[in-house]
Amino acid sequence: MRARLVAGNWKMYGNRSTNRALLEAIIRGMNGISGVECAVCVPFPYVAETAAQLARTPVAWGAQNLSEHAEGAYTGEVSAAMLAEFDCRYAIVGHSERRHLYGETDAQVAGKFAAAQAAGLTPILCVGETLAERDAYRTEAVVARQLDAVLDKSGVEAFARAVLAYEPVWAIGTGRNATPEQAQEVHGFLRARLAQRDKGVAEGLRVLYGGSMKPSNAAAIVAMPDVDGGLVGGASRVAEDFLAILRAAAS
């Protein structure tokens, strides 16, 4: 049985005061919620404070990005080893905003995935298609390409220590939402593609949905057989909404 996971992606929002209040509310709200794991992926400057506040709580923490390089003259970059020093459990790699706004290639994403695991972090690998790609019936080809880049570099066994997240880019901040059935279709495809290499790894892999999950649609989406939780954006910055999604995933 795969343990469900709901991970918040704060993106570039928050400050020390609002972050502290948000985490306090999440910690309080987690009392009585069982059967689902919770994590928050925060901006780099807040990793240390988040780690201190969440220590000895059921909430894990992580980063939204990292360098594919272990160390070196890479001004402005943050390595996996640096994040590991603050006990980060997770690191998001290949988020659509990194791919489309900053031009990250499949090869770079694969490098970041490998770097995260080399430092003991669990990568949350994001894959997903744009609206143009979906309308051109290229969804499966796009997510297969993105997934295969990591498989070819790290091998299928690496996914026993990873999380996969499907984020339909066309359903993020656009007002369009993927139906539970659309989410299941892609999640099932991804799991089946991994199963072609290793059925056991595929069955154990947690695949999260990352396309504007919110309290109103969370229960229906996580009820799908191949959806194991959510990678939550905007709703993760509102304690009541985030907790509602956690409760939906736990039920």
Image: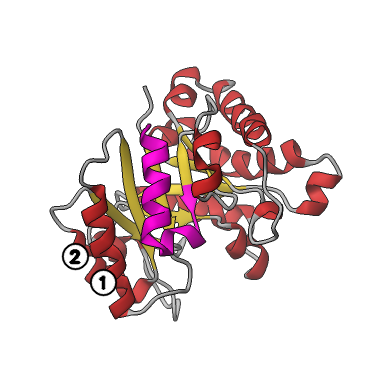
Q: CA distance from mark 2 to mark 1?
A: 8 Å
Magenta stretch: give its range. Answer: 231-251
| Local secondary structure at mark 2 | helix
Q: Nearer the viewer, residue 106 or 24?
A: 24
At which x and y percent is residue 116? 39, 53
- The quadrant of the picture occupied by the C terminus is top left
Q: Nearer the viewer, residue 147 or 183?
A: 183
Question: Residue 235 colored magenta?
Answer: yes
Q: Amino acid at mark 2?
A: Gln
Q: Principal SS element in the magenta part?
A: helix
At which x and y percent is residue 51? 22, 63
Residue 53's tag is 2
Q: Nearer the viewer, residue 89 or 24?
A: 24
At which x and y percent is residue 222? 50, 34
Residue at 82% from the left image edge and 53% from the top image edge: 132
CB-based contact (under 8 Å), mark 2 and mark 1: yes
Q: Earlier in the sequence, mark 2 or mark 1?
A: 1
Q: Is residue 129 left or right of residue 216?
A: right
Residue 20's tag is 1
Residue at 40% from the left image edge and 75% from the top image edge: 14
Residue at 29% from the left image edge and 66% from the top image edge: 82
- The quadrant of the picture occupied by the N terminus is top left
